[in-house]
Each structure stands twice: as structure tokens, then as C-alpha cells.
Image: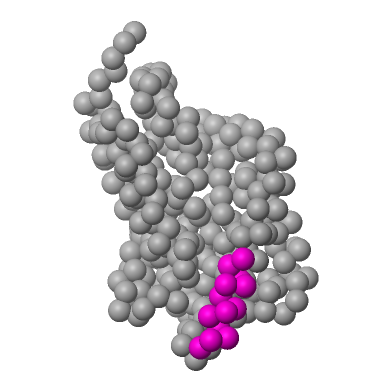
Amino acid sequence: MISYWSFFKIRFINGLQYRAAAYAGVVTQFAWGFMYIMLYHSFYRSNPSAISMNISELSSYIWLQQSFLALFMTWFLDEEIFESISSGNVAYEMCRPLNIYNMWFAKNCAIRVSRAILRCFPILIFASFLPETYKFYGPASIYSFMLFLISVVIGTMVVVAYCMLIYIFTFYTISSVGIRMTMVMTADFFAGGLVPLPLLPEYLTKFIYLSPFAAMQNTPFRIYTGGIPVNEAVKSIILQLFWAVVLILVGKFILSRAIKRVIVQGG
């Protein structure tokens, strides 16, 4: 465990060095945040009674989404891992006296957390001073905020565990492009990355809420805004933890089988 924690700290500190990219990302995410909110404003004005999420909740949801983009977006993948698999350099990773799954998991967590920390505070602070209906609001309650922090940690684990499956499935393909596009696009839609889940039809969301996709960004963001009440938030967090454990165990099982059958050509 100490080895993986050390690996996490090294990657975390390394990720904090890219401040120029983080500042550019902040500007980009502000632009996307405004665009999304203005787009939803037009829908709200056209038929406000049909919307199950009020505009203040939606604004906070979108600013949280932009602030923690690096934590919850499944398309935020580590190209070094894909390169090591396709080039055969993964053989060097397998020679280390460390579990390759745990090592990659720690690396991905460190990179995501470091980039999120650099971007989240400027976005949230600035968005808090915007005009009404555009601003970032405070949490529904202190209990919601505490549960939100717990849910963010577990939700990040779910996202990383899901992304680990993308890396692992690359062992079975010649190119990673197909599996990446399929799994990333599926997760983006069903996790609420494109449209918040409360705005989707109920006949669809009643199944999505039980899936690992809803355990990603949907749960922590809606706990913060009050969309998920405190008495239901604990159940949602338990479901998050369940999916985190399941995805990790499935990933470790598939990777163990893939490593036994992997063939590295060249020398």
C-alpha cells in the first residue's frame, strides 16, 4: 500500500506542474458552462412546467460538472497506458514487483485529482458572483455538503474503475479507438455528461439510476444541489460503493486473464 501511495504522490505532484494548461482549461470550461446554461434557459422559457430540475439546481450542476471535469469525464484517459499496451512496453510494467492494476489505478486517480484541484476553485469562486440563474449556489445543507464530499471520492473511484476496463479491453484489440469511442460515448450519455439525468424521460432514468453510470457524476452533483435528499443520499452512496467494488473486482479478474495470455513481439 505504501508503494502505491508513493506512486500516487509522485503522479499528483507531477500533474500540478501543468498550470498553464490548467488556466487554459479554466477559460474553456467557463465558455462551455455559459453556453450550456444559456442553452437550457431557452428550454426553460419555452416550457418551464415540463422541467423537473429548477434553474438554480441546473446552474450549480453545470458549474460543478465543469469544475470537476477531470474527475468525472471518461474520455479523460491516459495515453501512456494505451501506448505501453500497443507498443509492448507493458512487459516492463509487468516486471515490476507491484500489482499492475493497482499501479494504473493510482496513477489515474493522481492525474485526475491534480488537474481537478487546479481548475475547480477558480471556476466555482468566479461562478458564485454571477447574476441570478447563472451563478453557482451553495449546498442545500451542511449535511448535503458532507455527503457530497464522500460521494465525490467514491464517484471518482467508479469512473477510474470504468476507465480501467477500457485499458484492459485494449489487450484484446489491435486498435483501442473502437472500444474507447463505444465505452466513452455510452458513459457520457448515461452518466449525465451530455444531459443531466433528471431531464431525461422517467422510463429511461429508472433503469439508469441503478447502473454504474448514475454512480459517477450524477450522484455527487445532485446531492450537493438537493436533487437527492439527505435521507436518500446515503442509499445512493452505498450504491456507488457497490459499483466501485464490482468494477474493480471485474477489472482485476479480466486483467489477470489478459496478462496470462499476452504475447509481446520483438525484443
Camera-side residue of 54 and 223: 54
Q: Position of residue 47 (x, y in %)?
A: 51, 88
Position of residue 48 relative to residue 91, above or below, is below
Instruction: Tell me which residue sits at (36%, 20%) in the image.
Output: 88
Camera-side residue of 264 and 100: 264
Q: Position of residue 145 (x, y in %)?
A: 61, 70
Tell me if residue 38 is in the magenta stretch.
Answer: yes
Instruction: Tell me which residue sits at (72%, 40%) in the image.
Output: 20
Q: Which residues are magenta?
A: 35-47
Position of residue 123 relative to residue 263, above or below, is below
Which residue occupies the extreme bottom position in the image?
Answer: 49
63 sits left or right of 167 in the view:
right
Q: Position of residue 95 (x, y in %)?
A: 38, 18
Position of residue 255 relative to residue 212, above or below, is above
Q: Quadrant of the C terminus?
A: top left
Instruction: Tell me which residue sits at (53%, 86%) in the image.
Output: 46
